[in-house]
C-alpha cells in the first residue's frame, strides 16, 4: 500500500468514525435534553402539588376556625336557655375539627402563619373555657357575657388577619397595607 492509498483509507476511516460519533453525540445530547425536561416537569408537578396541599390546609384551617368561632358565638347567645344540648354538641364538634386542622397546619404552614394560627387557637380555647364555665354555672372572677362578647369580636379580627396572611402566602392577594 502506498502512502496515497493509506492516506485515503485513513481519511475514509476518520470520516466514517466522525460521522458515527457525531450521530452518537447528537443522540446523547438529545437524551440529556429530554432528561432535563423531564426533571423540570417533575419539579413543576411537585411544586404545584405542594402548593395545592398548602392551599387545602389553609382552607381547612380557616373553615374550622370559622366554625369554632361561630359555635362559640351561638353558645354565648344560647346561655340561659333551657335546652343547650345541641349547641354544646355543635361546639364540641367544631372544637375537635379545629384541633385537627390546627394539628395538620403545625406540620405544613410557614412560621408567620403558624404564629397567627397558634395565637388564634389559644384565644379560642380561652373563650371556650369561659363559655363552658358560664354554662356550667362556675365562672371565674372576671368571666362575664360582656367579656365573652368582647373576646369573640377580637377573635373575628384575629381570624381575618390570619386569613389575609394565608392569602398573601398563596399569592391570591397582596398583603393589605395598613388596612
Image (cartoon, rainbow, N blue to C red):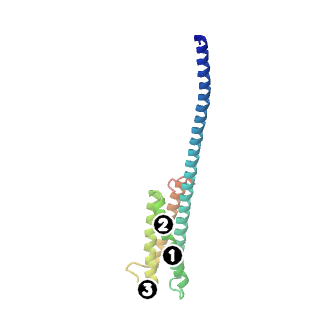
Which residue is depicted at the point 55% across and 48% down?
43
Q: Which mark is residue 72?
A: 1
Which numbered disc covers residue 102? 2
Where is residue 59 drawn, in percent x and y?
56, 63
**Quick one: SS at disc 1?**
helix
Label 2 vs label 1: CA separation?
A: 17 Å
Of residue 32 and residue 89, the one placed in the foreground of this image is 32
Q: Counting residues from the N terminus, which is met first, the one under dot 2 or under dot 1?
A: 1
Using a 10 Å C-alpha cutoff, classify the residue at mark 2 as few (fewer than 14 neighbours), some (14 to 19) or many (20 or more): many
Residue at x 62%, y 26% (from the top left corner): 19
The earlier-in-sequence mark between 1 and 3 is 1
In front: 11, or 115?
Answer: 11
| Residue 158, above or below 34 | below
Q: Are there few (<14), some (14-19), or many (20+) residues within 10 Å of tag 1?
A: many
Residue for point 45% across, 68% down: 121
The residue wearing badge 3 is 137
Relative to 1, residue 76 above or below: below
Image position, residue 136 (x, y; %): 44, 85
Bin the neighbour count of mark 3 within 10 Å (Cα to Cα): few under 14, some 14-19, many 20 and up: few
Q: Looking at the rendering, in which quadrant would you find the N terminus?
A: top right
Amino acid at each position: 500500500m502506498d502512502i496515497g492509498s493509506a492516506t485515503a483509507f485513513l481519511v475514509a476511516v476518520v470520516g466514517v468514525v466522525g460521522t458515527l460519533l457525531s450521530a452518537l453525540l447528537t443522540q446523547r445530547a438529545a437524551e440529556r435534553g429530554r432528561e432535563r425536561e423531564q426533571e423540570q416537569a417533575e419539579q413543576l408537578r411537585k411544586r404545584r402539588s405542594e402548593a395545592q396541599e398548602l392551599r387545602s390546609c389553609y382552607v381547612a384551617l380557616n373553615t374550622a376556625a370559622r366554625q369554632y368561632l361561630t359555635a362559640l358565638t351561638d353558645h354565648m347567645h344560647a346561655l340561659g336557655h333551657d335546652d343547650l344540648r345541641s349547641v354544646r354538641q355543635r361546639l364540641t364538634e367544631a372544637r375537635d375539627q379545629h384541633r385537627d386542622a390546627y394539628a395538620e397546619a403545625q406540620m405544613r404552614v410557614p412560621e408567620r402563619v403558624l404564629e397567627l394560627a397558634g395565637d388564634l387557637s389559644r384565644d379560642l380555647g380561652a373563650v371556650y373555657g369561659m363559655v363552658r364555665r358560664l354554662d356550667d354555672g362556675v365562672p371565674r372572677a372576671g368571666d362575664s357575657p360582656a367579656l365573652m362578647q368582647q373576646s369573640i369580636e377580637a377573635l373575628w379580627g384575629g381570624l381575618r388577619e390570619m386569613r389575609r396572611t394565608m392569602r398573601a402566602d398563596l399569592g391570591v392577594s397582596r398583603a393589605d397595607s395598613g388596612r
